Image (spheres, helix red, strand yellow):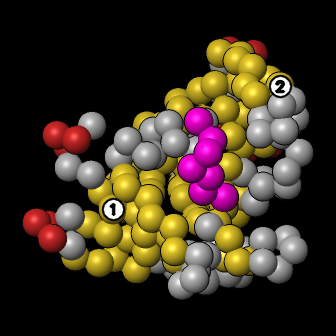
Amino acid sequence: MSRASSPKSAGRPAPRHRTLAGQAGLRRFEFPYLKDAHGRYAPIIYLQVWTGNRWLYLQAYVDSGASWSIFHVDVAELLGIKLNRAKRRYISLGNGSVIPIYLQHIKVRFAGMEFMAPAGFSDSLRVGFNLLGRAGFFDRFTMSFNDRARVLTATRLTTGAR
């Protein structure tokens, strides 16, 4: 469920993305859409999370409608996060249901940057994949979804924009 892997240990090639030089030195990264469990292309990307002694690749569906990134509780275990020490919150889903998440800041690498980002952990989401939401990401990057070309473009925002 958590889609955690290390590409080398899993026998997979490294995650694909393309770095583009933009105007005024902005850095843009293109992430080709990946196929979901139903074989449809979707804005699913790889990011890295710090476990305390190594970087771990995770797949996440980029969801501009999600306030928080939400990962399965199995990911928290891999990261060594004690959920009983994390802040418990309740969030509303698009279908109106409410689920608990355990909020913690995690160290991530995404689109050429390393930073701390808030992440929720839950076993109640039940969508079969991790979600990358707005908090911690959309304030650092402009995210552009091109469904026709099947590409997500993440452009770094300048430090003054945060």
Mark 2 neighbour density, 10 Å: few (under 14) some (14–19) many (20 or more): few
Would residue 118 be found to the left or right of residue 95 on screen? left
In space, the residues marked 2 and 1 are separated at their CA atoms by: 32 Å
Residue for badge 1? 155
Location of residue 154 by image quarter: bottom left
Q: Is residue 40 above or below residue 53?
A: below
Q: Is residue 65 in the magenta section?
A: yes
Mark 1 neighbour density, 10 Å: few (under 14) some (14–19) many (20 or more): many
Note whether residue 99 is visible.
no
In depth, the one of 154 and 87 nearer the eye is 154
- Find the magenta span and give its range: 61-67
Would residue 123 be found to the left or right of residue 50 on screen? right
Would residue 150 be found to the left or right of residue 83 on screen? left
**Image quadrant containing the C terminus:** top left
| Dot 1: element | strand
In depth, the one of 27 and 110 nearer the eye is 27
**Image quadrant containing the N terminus:** bottom right
Residue for badge 2? 98
| Dot 2: element | strand
Image position, residue 67 (x, y; %): 59, 36
Q: Amino acid at mark 2?
A: Val
Magenta part mainly helix, strand or loop?
Answer: loop
- Residue at the extreme left of the image, as rendered: 24
Would residue 54 be found to the left or right of residue 112 on screen? right
Give me the residue at 76% from left, 28% from top: 92
Image position, residue 7 (x, y; %): 64, 73
Image position, residue 129 (x, y; %): 78, 55
